[in-house]
Structure formats: structure tokens, C-alpha cells
Image (cartoon, rainbow, N blue to C red):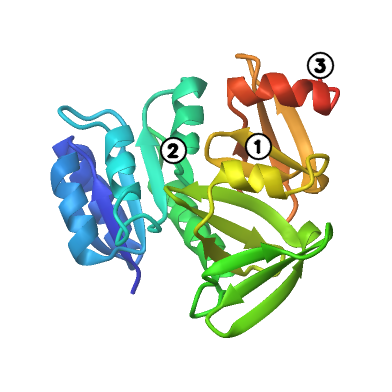
Amino acid sequence: MKRLLLIEDNTLTRENFCEIFESGGYEVIAASNGETGIELAKSSNPNLIICDLMMPNMDGFEVKKILSKNKKTSSIPFIYLTALADIKDVQYAMELGADDYITKPVGAKKLLELISNRLLRIEELNKKNSEKLPQNIYKTEDENILIKSGGKHILAVLDDIIIIKAKKDYSEILLKTGEKALIKKTLKSWEKTLPEKTFLRIHRNTIINSKLIEKIEPMFNGSYVARLKYYPDPIYFSQRYSQKIRKKLLLK
């Protein structure tokens, strides 16, 4: 049984969502504030966290920031629950590393469908992962990288890299095969290593393979949102990096 952690300050909404999740066959743990939610995330090891964005004392942004700094909770999939329709908040949420967001109000059927789809995506991305993540990575030629995991070395083609995400002093690489690698290497170092024509830094936390861009659209604030092959979620560009990328990709 999948375990969900719901962090929601509104009592009626929290109780209603708990009933919906339980009717869908999930084990549900609930917290009425961000502080309690963080402690439950550490102790209960949920499969997915659903967190309200606007809460007193500690909002959803701060909850995600704190969870991202803890080794036990940094990799737990995280979805924001919000009544806000402001795209700026959504964009910032995704830049913090959230996996998705749900806009309230939402019906029971739609809510369960969204949660089920998210959990399925997580399983699909993780099913081919190694039990032990690589501990280091080296560039061999312009087209290849060598990933070292203990005494094992894996040669991967650079084009197989879909996305690289910052995890404090580490970076997480996702390959087309579904494999992930956690490497002690900053995005700044990656920028010096990877071919500039192929790999784009789109904000402070993310580098993407530009060859895998299927669709890219402008947003009202001058930034962009893109879809990548082999990656289920939208990719949000920050305004800062959008200015640099606009010239490189000849975007309007």
C-alpha cells in the first residue's frame, strides 16, 4: 500500500482529502502545519508528499526547501496543493524541485487520477535504476561519459542524458534508459564539462539536453516552458536564463 503525506492547514480540506485518498486505497498521514509535516516526512518515509502552498508560519515553499536539505527526505516526490492561479508561484515551485502541482478546487475522481498518474510516473522512472547509485563520473571523449559506481564502470553516451538537477553539492543525472546517477558535482562544473551547443542551463537547479526538446512555449513574464522526450513533466525556464537561451535557440 502506497503511503501519502498530506500537509494542509485547513481542517475541512484536510479531512476531506484524507477520506478521498483512503477511498482510493492509500495509507494517509496528515499534518496541519509545515513543521509537523517535516517531522512526519522524516519519520514515516511516504511515497509521495502533497503539501498546501499557502499556510501560516511556514508556507509550502519553505517546507520544500527544508525537506530538500535533508538526505532522508530530499528525494521524496513532492506535489503542491494550491488555490493560486498565478503562474509565477507555479514556476517558482517547480524551480524548487517540486514534481507537480494540483489546483484547488478539485473533484475526488480527478484528484485520485492525478495522484495515481504521478505515482506511476515515479515507478516508470525508477524501475531501471541501479540499487547502488554511481559515486563519480568522468568525461572520456566529447560524446561519452564514464560513470563509476564502486568497482564498476559504465560508459554512457552524452546524448543519453535527459536532464541534470542540482541536489546541494551533488547533481542527479537522468538517462534515457531510466537510470539515475547521483554525482558529487555542481551544475557550474557540469557547464564546463558538457558541450555548450547541446546542453542548456535553464535555471539555477537544472541543465537539459536541448536535442530532446519536443515543444517550447513562451510565458507571459518573458520566460519559457518546455517538454522533453523521455521526461513526463513540464520544464520551466527562469527569466535570468531565458534571456541567454533566447539568442541561442533563436526564440522570439
Vertical position of residue 191 compared to residue 29: above or below:
above
Residue 76 % position (x, y)? 38, 58
Q: Secondary structure at mark 3?
A: loop
Q: Residue at x 44, y 38 (%)?
A: 96
Asked whether, in this view, residue 184 is left or right of residue 14, the answer is right
Asked whether, in this view, residue 137 is left or right of residue 171, the answer is right
Residue 68 % position (x, y)? 35, 48
Q: Quadrant of residue 188?
A: top right
Label 3: few (<14), some (14–19) or many (≥20) C-alpha neighbours in 10 Å: few
Q: Quadrant of residue 26?
A: bottom left
Q: Are circles 2 and 1 on residues that touch, CB within 8 Å?
A: no
The residue labelled by disc 2 is 96
Q: Secondary structure at mark 1?
A: strand
Mark 2 or mark 1, which has the lower sequence index?
Answer: 2
Mark 3 or mark 2, which has the lower sequence index?
Answer: 2
The residue labelled by disc 3 is 252
The residue labelled by disc 1 is 201
**Residue type, label 1:** Arg
- The reply to whether residue 166 is visible in this rendering is yes
